Image (cartoon, grey):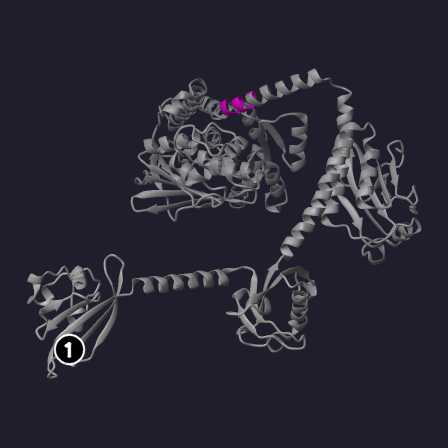
Amino acid sequence: MAATHIATLFLDRKLRILRFTPQIGELFNLRNVDKGRPLSDLTHHLNYDQLMNDAQAVLKDLIPTEREVRDNQNNWFLARMRPYRTADDRIEGVVLTFFDISAHKHTELALRKSEERYRTLFESMDEVFCVVDKVQDAEQSPNIVAANSAFYRLTGVNGLVGRRIAEAIPHLTEFWQDIFLRVSQEQDAVRFQCARSVFGRAVDVHAFSLPSSGSSEDAHVAVLLADIEDHKRVEEALREASLRDTFRIELADALRHSDDVEMSSCRLLSEYLQVDKVIFESALPDQSAGKYICNAGGSVISDDFRPWDEVDGLPTDFEPGASVSFDDLNAAEGLEPERLAACRRAGVEAFLVAFVIVDSSPAALTVMHSRARHWSDEERTLIKEVAERTRDAIERLQSEKAVHDRESELHEADERKNEFLAVLSHELRNPLAPIQNAIQLIEGAKPDSDAAHQAFSILKRQAAQMTRLIDDLLDITRIARGKIQIIKEKLELNELLKATMRDYKRLFEAGGIRLEFSPAEREAWILGDENRLSQSIGNLLQNCLKFTPKNGLTSVALRQEGPNAVLTVSDSGVGMSPELLARLFQPFSQGPAALDRANGGLGLGLALSRRLIELHGGSISASSEGAGTGSEFVIRLALVERPLPSKERRPRVNEVFRNRILIIEDNIDSGTTMRDLLQMHGHEVVVVHDGQTGLDTAQTFRPDVVLCDIGLPGMDGYDVARRIRSDKHLADTVLIALSGYAMPEDLERASGAGFDHHLAKPADLRKLSTLLASIESRTTTNSS
């Protein structure tokens, strides 16, 4: 047995070891002293859990068994068991042999994986791929040997393999005959684009011969079909875009260097569009000095013809920024018969007019052609653009004559200074209106009254807010170090979110980004600093605003999760990489330079938000699936019990209100203090904070007087006034405008919208009282 290289093990009828070859000793760790030991006592390196069961079965049933097993070194063996007999045909036990089949097994597995890889590649291809028999006679129809799923999608027929093309897809017979002809002529791979009529789309064809197995003769033809319809369309669009870009570059150069910008615009536009006539001129008939005409060669269109009617010296269709066009006057609908006849007499079959205002005067860019033609959307946009850029060039030339380079530099520096001062003054001015109202409230209230205490609270809160603003301006390092003091009070988080989102609504609208809010199902009270929480949430909204493209979406959602309020702010923006997420809340942390510099910022907002949330005992986290997948921020804050109802002033039973007054003011403190002041004077007052709520309240409250802020979020005060004036049930209501703008044109606009009176912010109480007293008698009469 020592001479054999096969691992062999002999067992007696009790499955004890009789003898073995050296090779089996390596698998079972056997030595000569192991002879006589039961097989069940042995350890081995094989993944062969059925070893004992198989041996017992062979000994019992006398039926050989065979298995492929593997050891812990990934070597494969063919394990065979059979009973062995003595010379006198007696069953003496079981013999086990292990043949090393590792090389064969590894080759088999490699081939199987290779086949699976190629099959996966074959089926996952976007391109259509198929193999057909190569036929020598063009009249014969080849069999389809192989085809991927893309081929089935293209033809709309399943089960093509093994069928003849003429039977399965007869409409493609000529297409295949053309392929065979090209391959036989070229004797090599061929590539061409087939006609759109074959598949209804532009398709690139790559065909080549495949040798048959074991033969050098060509037996099959493989065909790769690539759908290039989108590519062709993009290619055509890019070509047109390139021509437009070239035109725009030439136009910009001409407008920048030419003193005759109108003529240059007409000439370039005529050459680009290949039309008969282009005119840029004043739209007023008595101003002929500004007429610039460019005629193409052989033009038959009259120089004096204009394709519009006039009313009071202006075109009937004139509107700055608008355009009027007809592609084919023979098929035109809605064109007056007289106007149609005039166009035909002038030799015009198609025209487009773009109207603009140049130096406060109406002007028109008119494009006319003697043959019908379709004006594409790109051409319409381009003609309007040329009109506007020509107008801009004219006004630029006029401005350049009046100013010098030095004055422009000083003006730019002055603008930067004014912008900074405007931002700073706006932030510092916001608390002034509620402060002034609170002062007047204190002057008219009893020292220990609720109104006085509330006024003092407002003064403290607004003074603290101004102090914080000034502190942040003087010492910005406090933010980077997180040294920020917070003042906590019970807040309803739904209302806080609504107020904060109102502050950012216009910015989102200006950026073309939708801002949506999903409130919690019930009130969510927390303990926190209203200003600092608004600041933290505002930083997140500002982040979404920076990194979400136009037509994107920012969603704010609030829910209650156990003892916590969970606020989620998510966007559909550029997303964040794992590297950026790891350092996102660190001070001065920013995204890639090319992106972040375009959006500005010092990189302190998110770090400040995290510190503020942590000071409230909460947490904030961020997540993103990567670039282009948007981002999500989650804030968790502990919930607290709802506060007890505040003690508000209730009117006495015998008290008679002098007027029913509705205040529509988005500044909560300003509205609240004005309400308290008016209630002190005996009026019945309701305060709301947006235009739509104001309209709804007016329907039920039926006020005698409406004090309405002009700069409301969403629907402004002018729209509110117009809606109230259109309601017959509110016809007698007196409308008083409240605005920080008090120029004559502002007063005129307020009057035009339906306001009876106009008060500049902050409203003087004495003036307001005098005004209300003037309408008191009418209100009393109506009440009686």
Badge 1 density bin: few <14, some 14–19, many ≥20, Cα 10 Å: some
Q: Is residue 425 magenta?
A: yes
The residue where tag 1 is placed is 84
Q: Is residue 14 left or right of residue 657?
A: left
Specify the segment rendered in magenta: 421-428
Furthest residue toward front: 3
Q: Estimate the x, y position of residue 538 in percent, counting from the top left.
A: 45, 34
Q: Give the answer, above or below, for where 645 lies relative to 333.
A: above
Q: Estimate the x, y position of residue 390 in percent, counting from the top left.
A: 77, 34
Q: Is residue 325 left or right of residue 487?
A: right
The quarter in which the N terminus is drawn is bottom left
Nearest the viewer among 388 and 379 is: 379
Q: Give the answer, above or below, for where 285 lies relative to 759.
A: below
Nearest the viewer among 287 and 290 is: 290
Q: Estimate the x, y position of residue 209 in percent, counting from the top left.
A: 59, 65
Q: Is residue 688 magenta?
A: no
- In the figure, residue 143 lies in which quadrant? bottom right
Q: Estimate the x, y position of residue 764 in percent, counting from the top left.
A: 54, 23
The quarter in which the C terminus is drawn is top right
Q: Is residue 723 visible?
A: yes
Instruction: Residue at 11% x, 63% y: name it.
Output: 42
Furthest residue toward bottom: 88
Nearest the viewer among 325 and 626 is: 626
